[in-house]
Amino acid sequence: MKNLLTIAGSDSSGGAGIQADIKTFSACGCYGMSVITAVTAQNTAGVSAVFSIPPDIIRAQADAVFQDIRVDGVKIGMLAEADAAEAVADILEKYRPQITVLDPVMVSTSGDELSRGTAIKAVIERIMPHVKLITPNIPEAERLSGIKISDVYDMARAARIIGSMGPRYVLIKGGHLPDSADDLIYNGKTMTILEGKRLNVKNTHGTGCSISSAICANLSKGMDMVTAAAEAKRYVRTGLEHGLDIGHGCGPLHHFYDLWRTSEPSVETEFDCREKE
């Protein structure tokens, strides 16, 4: 079994952040561990409070994991403050994990700002040169690249700009496109489009966290980048198609649908409940 570490914020409602990451790792057959960078008070309707974990505690959590357990892949999510990003950069420089997937979480599904501008600057300057893959959605890619994105041609331009910042691969998620949900992968030379039809669903909480974690899991198991991303896209699409109606806002995708649908007990099973004499 591959051991995967998520470095991200905690979601008290369980739909996004480290909770979504660990659920995804488990659904993909991997063992999940965590370094918490922030604690959020959030639910399906929004984020009401954020408490950033002190950087020395972030480093201590990582040291506790890396010094005891083999880490086969790292997924990085929410970094609310610049000192958190600096701490994570120190961790990457110290332990140099082979697989690092960065999901540059800036705004929650409900529209709440999750990262300060200084944190984003630190991510660009200190973390992006160390990652294998970065997975921004369109608003995040616009913020990182400085250009407006309206179609896949704009996505390609943005991918080149973001790719020049250091990551080996760029995956721009197309869920915010008006007519499709095509994703684009850039490897520094060529572009690959992963086609996808738009789903008319409400329960999308934790989608970005989940797809980046699924890609990390797939890469750790030896898949090439395009296959890893395509399989992660299929996994998340299934979860969205069977999303959970939890809460009053955008509920989470169903992380364990493929396992859940095959684990129902047979109605034909009979049990002998007689007491022994």
Image (cartoon, rainbow, N blue to C red):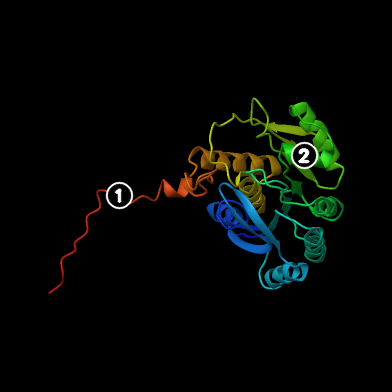
Amino acid type indicated by mark 1: Ser
Q: Judge by depth and name the residue closer to the eye, 178 or 102.
A: 178
Question: Whole-percent x and y of residue 56?
Answer: 77, 71
Q: Is residue 21 visible?
A: yes
Question: Whole-percent x and y of residue 150?
Answer: 75, 27
Q: Which callout, 1 or 2, points at the residue further toward the start of the chain?
A: 2
Looking at the rendering, in which quadrant would you find the N terminus? bottom right
Which label was assigned to residue 49?
none
258 vs 191, left or right, is: left
Residue at the far left in the pictured view: 277
Looking at the rendering, in which quadrant would you find the C terminus? bottom left
**Callout 2 crowding tier (Cα within 10 Å): few <14, some 14–19, many ≥20:** many
Q: Distance between the Cα atoms at labels 1 and 2?
A: 47 Å
Residue for point 65% across, 44% down: 228
Q: Judge by depth and name the residue closer to the eye, 200 or 49.
A: 49
Q: Secondary structure at mark 1?
A: loop
Which label was assigned to residue 141?
2
223 vs 120, left or right, is: left
Residue for point 59% across, 30% down: 198
- Looking at the rendered structure, the number of numbered marks drawn on it comes to 2
Reading the image, the residue beneath label 1 is 266
